[in-house]
Image: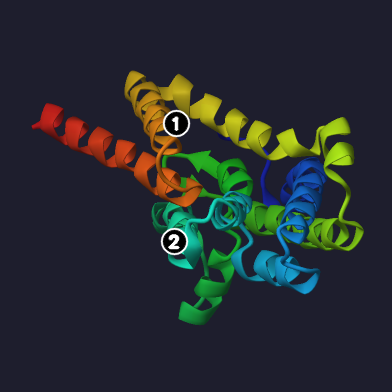
Amino acid sequence: MTSTESGYAAGVRVGLGIGVPTFVMGVTFGAMAHSLGWGTLAPVICSLAVFSGSAQFALATSLAGGGGVAVAVGAAAMINARFLPMGVAVASDLKGGRLRRALEGQAVVDASWAAAHKGNGRYDREKMIAATLIQAPAWILGTLLGALTAPSSEIIHRFGLDVVFPAFFLLLLIDELRASAQARWVAATAAALAAGLSLVVPAGLAILGSGLAALIGLRTRTAVNA
């Protein structure tokens, strides 16, 4: 994803466009966590500390599936591991010393990172930072609202709140699937692994197991290039 718009103003526009679904996903997470017995404060702290919808839902789902804390944290950490290469990619466009660059690096989230890509491996730091500054309060306030109101499962299903999260990441997946045949093969393998493992192990272990597809794909690609 590339864009000709740049700067903080462009980032604000991106953030506002993503802010509504981010808020709704936050409500869904807060309500889900509350229904699992997290109370009101724990979901909000989780959103403040982790600030990753995919990792937080994986954490909650794994705990609900009986996988235990270690498995749940492992599943969340595996999903968030994607931020390592994303951070490396954007590192040269950040400014200042180590502390400032580390703080600016907190703006590396999926939508902001993708929107800030200018092509040829360069990123618009102002656009990325501004987009994330809009999304962060939307996610945290959404989590708080969901945890406070704790909408029933009937309301969640009626308004489609339960499909907002998977739909958002399905859109990201579609872009990846269009990129190459290898991406499609890895996605299909991961889905098959997750589906098969979910029949015999807790959800967290199934998520961890599905990650093997990426390693298999990487090894296959390395072998082909060699």
Q: Residue 195 carries which label?
A: 1
The residue indicated by pointer 2 is 91
Q: Residues within 10 Å of mark 1 (few under 14, many from 20)?
A: some
Q: Do the residues labelled 1 and 2 touch (CB within 8 Å)?
A: no
User: What is the quadrant of the C terminus in the image?
Assistant: top left
Residue at image coords 39%, 48%: 208
Most extreme residue toward the left is 226
User: What is the quadrant of the N terminus in the image?
Assistant: top right
Left or right: where does residue 44 sit relative to residue 173? right
Query: SS for tag 1?
Result: helix
Left or right: where does residue 195 sit relative to residue 172? left
Q: Report, in whole angstroms, how far the alpha carbon at label 1 lies from the one at label 2.
A: 36 Å
**Which circle's residue, 1 or 2, is located before the other in the chain?**
2
- Camera-nearest label, 1 or 2: 1
Give residue 212's position: percent from left, percent from top: 30, 41
Q: How many marks?
A: 2
Residue at image coords 87%, 46%: 152
Query: SS for tag 2?
Result: helix
Give residue 133's position: percent from left, percent from top: 73, 61
Q: In which quarter of the image is residue 146?
A: bottom right
Give residue 44's position: percent from left, percent from top: 75, 68
Q: How crowded is mark 2: few (under 14 residues within 10 Å), some or many (20 or more)?
A: some
6, 171: nearer the viewer: 171
Callout 2 amino acid: Ala
5, 226: nearer the viewer: 226
Left or right: where does residue 44 sit relative to residue 110? right
125, 156: nearer the viewer: 156
Q: Is residue 68 above or below residue 65?
A: below
Callout 1 amino acid: Ala
Residue at image coords 88%, 59%: 145
Q: In which quarter of the image is residue 2?
A: top right
